[in-house]
Image: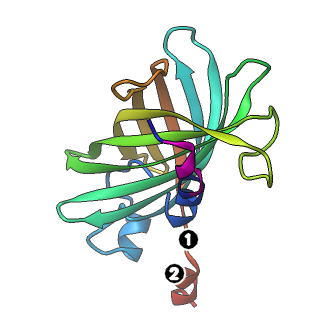
Amino acid sequence: MTSRSSLPTLAAAPLLALGLLFATLDPTLAATNPGDPWSGTYDMRGMTTDLASGDQRRIEGHIVIAKKGKGWSASADLSTEYPAEGGAVHTDVIGDGVGLPKGDRLEGSAHTQLVIGTVPGVDTGFAFIPRQVGPRIVSQWTAHFEKDGTLVVELANAPEKGEKYRPTKTTLRGKRVEMPDEAAGKK
């Protein structure tokens, strides 16, 4: 298990990158990334469902996808309200994944970690508020683009060996974010 001394590193991880998933060809992306339609930053929103209880919670944030060898790497910076005694607490979901093309989709695996707030209703990044490292999660995922360019990612989430986490399913939907250098190139 990760020690408390690694908290500063984990809290900084979202600043370094964001992660998971992607898939098929979107013509607007092909124009900005010839030969690599998946790379980019995506603004994502969705729901995570507890498979045992059916309870749902919102999840949102960003993922960054980059071409790496024959596949793609992805980093995630997401947030949710994680259930806890005394009420849900703000939780950052950070991690990375890899994926390979399979037909019109990408498929892969991801490893994430929860950084959980200790005060209900207060962001984990708020100064002087303690936070704790939560369970490590492994996910199997698929992703594809809808005709309008929306990226859809579906994840099956389970605890990594030795961790306690109730299996969940997450569905994220979002659009690619235009970067400043891309906007400048259109002028």
Magenta stretch encompasses residue 181 = no
Q: Residue tagged by mark 1?
A: 178
> Residue 104 or 43: which is nearer the viewer?
43
| Dot 1 alpha-carbon crowd within 10 angstroms: few under 14, some 14 to 19, many 20 or more | few
Q: Position of residue 122 (x, y in %)?
A: 81, 41
> Residue 69 or 145: which is nearer the viewer?
69
Quadrant location of the N terminus in the rendered image: top left
In the displayed structure, does residue 149 sit left or right of residue 114? left
In the displayed structure, does residue 16 sit left or right of residue 107? right
Please state the extent of the stretch shown in magenta in the rendering: 3-8
Residue 112 to residue 150: above or below: above
Kindly report the secondary structure that dominates the magenta region of the rendered protein.
helix
Residue 155's quadrant in the figure? top left
At x 36% / y 42%, what residue is drawn?
Answer: 110
Q: Residue tagged by mark 2?
A: 182
Q: Amino acid at mark 2?
A: Glu
Residue 116's quadrant in the figure? top right
Residue 39's disc is: none
> Residue 117 or 103: which is nearer the viewer?
117
Asked if the residue under mark 2 is in contact with the one under mark 1, i.e. CB atoms within 8 Å, the reply is: yes
Residue 50 to residue 171: above or below: above
